[in-house]
Image: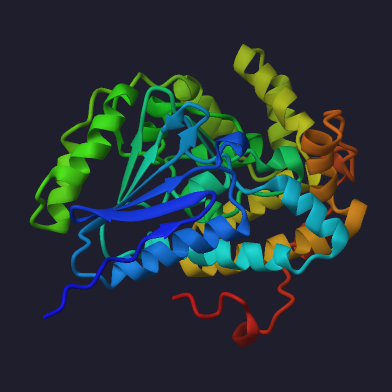
Amino acid sequence: MMKTTPFRLDTEFVTGVVAGRVGLISLTRPKALNALDLGMVDSITQCLQAWRDDGTVLAVVIRGSDKNGPFGHFCAGGDIRFFHQAALANDTALEEFFTNEYALNHLIHTYPKPYIALMDGVVMGGGMGIAQGASLRVVTPHSKLAMPETNIGLFPDVGGGFFLSRAPGRIGEYLGLTGEMIQAGDAIAAGLADVCVDRGHLAILWQELQDTPFESSAAVERWVQGKASPAPLPETFKDRSAIDAVFGLDSVASMEAALAEMDTPWAAHTLKVLQSRSPLMLHVVLEQIRKARTMTLAEDLRMERDMVYQCFNWRSGTESETVEGIRALAVDKDHQPKWNPPLISGVTPDMVAQFFKSPWAPDMHPLAHLS
């Protein structure tokens, strides 16, 4: 029988190659911290679909890069400058990006072979989306994880409702509303990572993955787990009882009031952070995470696809909360977004409800095929 050559891919920002019995994906857009564009999303999808049905491939491993070469950073999220430009130009590629990205997130969560994410450095937003569905999520002492979308008038998408809502206690609400960054020990404590590996061992691990004659998919995963080292102690969740008490309240306004009454450095800092975020999206995210607790992954991704449509279309152009948030952070960089409404107290239930209206009939939904 003629031996076929495994699928490989080599584009400007993504390479995919089979070495030994492992599919290896590298993100190579370091100037943008490997921020995902449509081509990158589609390239990762192509690799996973090809290797899913290739019996010679036992597992898939994905890494990022920085200006010095492989590793250093994983992925900072979606390309928000593209979001801004596309929204103002009514570019249909924006809708295509989110549909394809969320379908990729679902593919990763449901992948039948081990999919191992080496989450070194920055792992935020869309980077969390291509990591949280991994069967093994590897962090390093240099990992920096966050879902910071409320800072740009967006919400923690890419399945964020699903994986944040399943964090212990009210950690999901806390991370989703504040967008606070966490490191390796906190990520493991929150159920957002599995093992820690020293950054200096990643290059050796990557090479040995290619050289080791693995006999099964499970053997690949066990081998990587065997490289784990103790993670740094959690730092962010030292105030865990306060997090659960405040972020378990029934409304953002109640959280704001509770923090204002507490006389602790954590409360003062957290109140300042909340009051800098989009008031509208704080309310939307609280509703998203609590709805997602009883949803399947596919249901959550369909809900998020509806939500992101509303982010750019309920108020279009420069009136979009998301367009304004990106402008302030990444375009004009004045860090002075003009949120609408400007205060937490100004958000009404009708405003929040708008984000959970689907513009599509169920059978016409762009993610109707997810199960």
Residue 252 location in percent, x, y? 71, 41
Residue 57 location in percent, x, y? 22, 62
User: Would residue 315 be visible to someone looking at this image?
Assistant: no
Residue 209 location in percent, x, y? 20, 43
Residue 345 location in percent, x, y? 85, 40
Q: Is residue 24 left or right of residue 235?
A: left
Q: Residue at x 52, y 29 (%)?
A: 67
In the depicted structure, whether residue 111 falls above or below residue 117: below
Q: Tell which residue pokes out farthest to the front in this image.
A: 2
Q: To which quarter of the image does residue 108 belong?
A: bottom left
Q: Residue at x 56, y 61 (%)?
A: 101
User: Would residue 124 be visible to someone looking at this image?
Assistant: yes
Q: In the rendered view of the protein, which quadrant contains the C terminus?
A: bottom left
Q: Residue at x 89, y 44 (%)?
A: 341
Q: Is residue 130 left or right of residue 261?
A: left
Q: How many marks?
A: 0
From the viewer's side, name the closer residue of 277 and 79: 79
